[in-house]
Every structure is written in C-alpha cells, then in structure tokens.
Amino acid sequence: MISKKNKIKKIKDFFPKIPGILVEHFFTTLFLLLILDLALTGVLFYKYYLQKKDLEFQIQTLGLNEELFNDVLEEWQRREEVFKAVDSKQYLDLFRF
C-alpha cells in the first residue's frame, strides 16, 4: 500500500513537469486547445443567438418631446449669449504698469 506522503510527493513532482510535457507534445496541445475553444464558442453562440425565440426586432417610432426640445434650445441660446459676453469683456492688463 502506498502511503499518503508518497502520493503527495508524486503529485508534487508531477506539477512542475506539466509545462515540459505540453511543450514536448506541442501539436497535440495546440489541437486540443483549438477544439476546446471551438466547443466553448459553439456553446456561447448556441446559448445567446440560436436559442433566442424572438429574433424579430420591432421598430420603435421616435416622438419628439416639444417641451424638452424648447428647454434645450433655450439653454443653448443662454449659453451662447454668455459665451459672446465673455468675448466682449475688457480685462485689465496685468503686465502694464
């Protein structure tokens, strides 16, 4: 019977060897990762695209809220007036004595 210490030692010795094993079998590793990637992509595609029953999109008509439009227009005009007022303001020249 193999003792627990011996089992743990075998496991500890195996984990550092994993990268070396994967590099030795590069083509097989690459092929398995590609298959895993395709399977995961297929599952996600099926779940989020093919399984949807209601795929028809409804076109919503956009209504114009006149009150909101007028409020925005007034705010833009107010800001434009403030912007133009700054241009005409005369500032003191701090560098002239």
Image: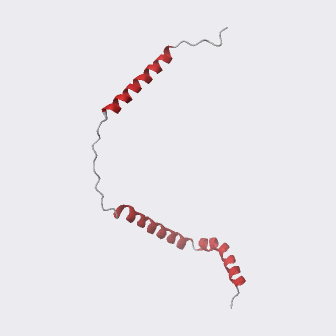
Marker count (numbered): 0
Q: Does residue 94 sit above or below 47 in this rendering?
A: above
Q: Residue furthest right?
A: 5
Q: Residue furthest front?
A: 67
The foreground one among 10 and 63 is 63
| Residue 40 rendering spot, x and y as whole percentages | 45, 67
Q: Residue furthest bottom?
A: 1
The foreground one among 32 and 70 is 70
Q: Does residue 7 sit above or below 92 in this rendering?
A: below
How is the model colour-coded? secondary structure
Q: Quadrant of the C terminus?
A: top right
- Res 41 → quadrant: bottom left
**Residue found 64% across the figure and 13% down from its top:** 94
| Residue 1 rendering spot, x and y as whole percentages | 68, 91
**Residue found 62% across the figure and 74% down from its top:** 21
**Residue found 53% across the figure and 73% down from its top:** 28
Q: Does residue 75 sit above or below 91 in this rendering?
A: below
| Residue 96 rendering spot, x and y as whole percentages | 65, 9
The foreground one among 41 and 72 is 72
| Residue 76 rendering spot, x and y as whole percentages | 41, 26
